[in-house]
Image (spheres, helix red, strand yellow):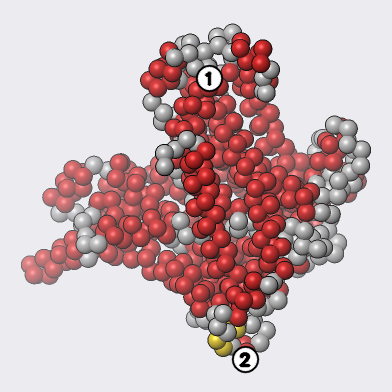
Amino acid sequence: MSTTTEDRIAHEPAPAARRNRIKPSMSGRAPQDTPAGKWTYLLLGLTFLLSIYPIYWMFVIATSTDAALAEIPPKFLPGGEFMKNLDEVFSLQDVYFAESLVNSVIVSTVITVSVLFFCSVAGYAFAKLRFRGSRILMVMVILTLTVPNQLGIVALYILMGYMPGEGGWNGSLLAVIVPGLVSAFGVFYMRQFILGAVPDELIESGRVDGATTMRIYWSIVLPAVRPALAVLGLLTFVGSWNDFQWPLITLGGTDYPTSMVALFDLASGNYVLYRRVLAGAFVATVPLIILLFVGGRQIVRGIMEGAVKS
Amino acid sequence: MRGLSHRLHRFDVKQMPYVLIAPFFILFTIFGLFPLIFNGVVALRTWRLDDPAQDGWAGLANFERLLTDEDFWNALYNTFGIFVLSTVPQLFLALCVAFLLNRRLRGQTWFRVSMLLPYITPLTASTLVFLVVFGRDTGVANWVLSLFGMDSPIDWRAGKLQSWVAIATMVNWKWIGYNALLYLSAMQTIPRDIYEASALDGASSWKQLWRITVPMILPVVIFTVVLSTIGGLQLFTEPMLLDSNPASASGGSNGEWQTIAQLIYKVGWKNLNLGYAAAMSWALFLIIVIVAVVNTLVTNRLGGGKR
């Protein structure tokens, strides 16, 4: 294999003469069994740089003075102003940045824990328990996967206005948390996983021993589905942390935003300083980078297994 | 006593499954399904946030207004422009990256995880960075272009095409790695002996990509096309933040890049006309369904699928 595939891609479009030189992949190995050549590494390296550059650039500006933005060629190394910029972000009135971080942690944590619990019990019921209508109800879950919820956003806002309590739920964290407490994707994903991970015999033997449905869930199902819980938990946390449109509508203009809404406020107004904006953006990004660092393997697996709707 | 425990057991077997699935169905019905349906009712009414007294049936007035609303057609045009500029390169490049990843790699897991950096970055945060990158006077994008010999800097907010390109770049950056992983997982399920057979026939690996790999992963390609149609037509965060004053939701001084989702927000929560915003949501829903179906058919045809 003197001519590697990577060679060819890199030189596309190939001139006719070159095209004739292309040799068949004679080994007959599937691509995933073929060792990568230097061009593959080079191009993947380039992809990596393009992926990380905006995040790195965010850090560079976040740690610099106003002058850094005007430098040409662009400033490459971070400066030493991060704490000062951050301090300004936190002390800005009308932005409520510190509160927003706390709110985001509350919202994402509550939603994640709730999704994990409700979706795993429902997935368990659909995968392993027999009850009338289970098939049609599961079809309904799958159908709801395809409906973009955003389209009901106007009506959701009106509905929140009628919720119990003074003035309804708009402007309170409840409006952001409660609709996120369950997810159709979570039910579907847990069901698929439980079908494969928990043998029927195990459930049967639990029944014979006189264990209740919930007892079987705690001692047999839950330990077996921990990997799936990790995947679903990470994807759910990331999704709710990053959610923007609905929180902006219901929490925008209040003194109780999530961090995404606070970033929007930081970037609005007449006097926007990007070293501040990006210092805030960086702070709101760090928790997720840590999550990717810790649970990247699980997230990749979740996505590759078809975990797509977050 | 025996009777009670028997009854409990019966409950556990017969009713418990319903108890377990009830939270999902109850919450989903209230906060997912009901708003979708109720949205249709709101669209047929006059529903103003600033003047609740005006409340009443409006018939099809909101929809009629839609047909002649220049802002709506402009937003529709923008949405489609950005959609095309983002989806086509995004899925093609994702295919290329998946092709690169589908080798025996050293540091395989590391490469895969790193592809998710853009996916995991909050959309608001990355959009704010791109805002600086696409600055007119000192932005990195213009600097890079100047290295390639472009002498007059582009004002990325000054016209439709350049603002669409800027937004499409943000969308592509975010989603290429994610889609690449979806393609990669499909590529790895292709039976190995198919490659062996085609190697015997003398197919090059470039040919293998187009003759074996792409047709075999076609279902996933269609899936990503549908996903990016649903996501792309609801584009909101990027166009919102590109504005020099994001809170205005105007998408440029002349609505150069105002998308439908952004217009819905503006009509509903800036102009306080929820009835009209609801009608727009229904129109968007219809458009998404039509485009998703058309795209599926086209992809299927292009990918060599039957029918």
The amino acid on which the numbered mark 1 sits, given as a three-letter code, is: Ser
Residue A279 visible? The answer is no
Determine if residue A3 is in view.
Answer: yes
Q: At numbered mark 2, what does the secondary structure look like: helix, strand or loop?
A: helix
Q: Is residue A243 left or right of residue A50?
A: left
Choose the circle earlier in sequence order: 2 or 1.
Answer: 2
How many C-alpha atoms fall within 10 Å of the one at disc 1: few (<14), some, or many (≥20)? many
Q: What residue appears at the point 44 percent right and 68 percent down from the top-left corner?
A: B33
Label 2 neighbourhood size at 10 Å, few (<14), some (14-19), many (20+)? few
Residue at 55 percent of width and 11 percent of height: A23
- Above or below, comparing residue A41 to residue A96 in the picture: above
Q: Residue at x 88, y 36 (%)?
A: B150
Chain containing mark 2: B
Single out the residue that lies furthest toward the front: B307
Disc 2 marks a residue whose amino acid type is Ala
- Residues flagged by tags 2 and 1 on a common chain: yes
Residue B40: percent from the left, percent from the top? 51, 74
Between the residue at mark 2 and the residue at mark 1, the CA separation in whole angstroms equals 69 Å
Could you tell whether B194 is left or right of A151 in the image? Answer: left
Residue at image mark 1: B205
Residue at image x 67%, y 78%?
B272
Q: Are marks 2 and 1 in contact (CB under 8 Å)?
A: no
In the picture, which quadrant includes the N terminus of chain B?
Answer: bottom left
Residue A152, image x and y in percent? Answer: 53, 68
Picture layout, residue B268 above or below residue B168: below
Q: Quadrant of the C terminus of chain B?
A: top left
Viewer-proximal residue among B287 and A136: B287
Of A104 and A197, the residue lying toward us: A197
Residue designated by label 2: B53
Q: Secondary structure at mark 1?
A: helix
